[in-house]
Image: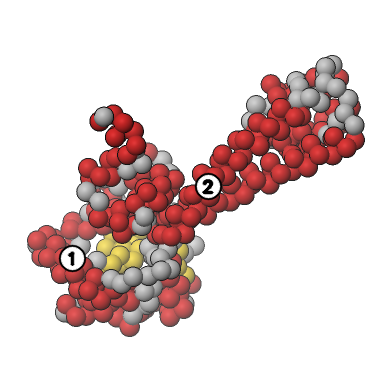
Amino acid sequence: MRQLFILFENASGYSLFRVKEEHVVGTDTAEFAKSLQSISTFGALVSLVSFSPFSSAANALENAEDIVNGICSADLEQFLRVNLLTANAKAGAVELGVGDKDLASSINHATSITTTRSEPVPELLRGIRQHQLKLIPELAASAAALHASELGLGHALSRHKLKFNVHREDNNIIQAIALLDQLDKDVNTNAMRLREWYSVLFPELAKLVPEAYEYAKIARAIGPKEALTDDRLGEIAELLNGDDERARAILEASKLSIGQKAADVDVDFVMRFCTQVIDLTDYRRAIASYLSSRMSEVAPNVSALIGDTVGARLISHAGSLTNLAKYPASTVQIVGAEKALFRALK
């Protein structure tokens, strides 16, 4: 089993932490989230292996630029080789948690160290950043010095990196949330239409299967209600996640249904519509998953604070992530509710 380490970068230098895996369990639980808030409990999860400060402000800027661009610098490669490979004999014995996917790939290519960004790495990085002054003795002496170095590096990096980019990543988020909102409307409208249409053939099914996606799958599987026989009970139960009781109720309802017998051409078009609703719902879920992954990469802090969907809508309303970052709190408070606010003020 590989030993998990965490790479943490700040304005002062590189730090390497060893994760005490026996204490890192249930990362999605409230208890784990609570343990990140206190240094007494979080200190039991990680321990500092090594800290390598930057030699100068220019060196800090050079390394920061490489990190932003997802490049494993010579300084970082040497730091990892000395503290990971030398100490653990071979790259296969360790796994390195890294916050950025491009940097993780570059580290793996340069050192052959296995990297990961999966849980619990993001939460552990968040905890390390919160408690860095107490976890790294070299920083504990002066919080003011750390703040000054962060401010100076931020200004220097901005002067080098701020430029207009027509291919900015937040544009993908803006388009994805707009598509997701449109798909929500389309899925709901088509699901209601399908329920009304298929109810002509089998009206009792609507009460037995209230969820739209399940309803479309069951309706497509049944076809005309006359085709539902006892030997298909297992097929229907499988579509209902093994709910034999509901499957039996659907079978009995089909035998006593007051629905009309439809022509083959009518059934054919209803079945096509079922497939359309299912495909549209699957696509909607794929877009939601894509949006979640893009938000975790482009705006992880916004995503962690208010969720993927709401965060994406804020970025969309603001026009870009940069614009949202510049908003004062009073503006963020009313984003998306401007019309209602102005109506109330009249």
- Residue located beneath label 1 in the image: 150
Q: How many marks?
A: 2
Q: Is residue 194 left or right of residue 60?
A: right
Q: From this viewpoint, which residue is outermost toward the bottom?
A: 74
- In this view, the residue in front, 149 or 281, is 281
Splitting the image into 4 quarters, where does residue 121 fall? Answer: bottom left
Tell me residue 338's x, y (percent).
Answer: 32, 39
**In the displayed structure, would residue 216 be above or below residue 256?**
below
- In this view, the residue in front, 98 or 163, is 163
Tell me residue 125's x, y (percent).
Answer: 33, 57
Circle 2 sits in a helix, a strand or a loop, which is it?
helix
- Residue located beneath label 2 in the image: 180
Tell me residue 304's x, y (percent).
Answer: 36, 48
Dot 2 or dot 1, earlier in sequence: 1
Label 2 Cα crowd, 10 Å radius (few <14 / some 14-19 / many 20+):
some
Amino acid type, label 1: Glu
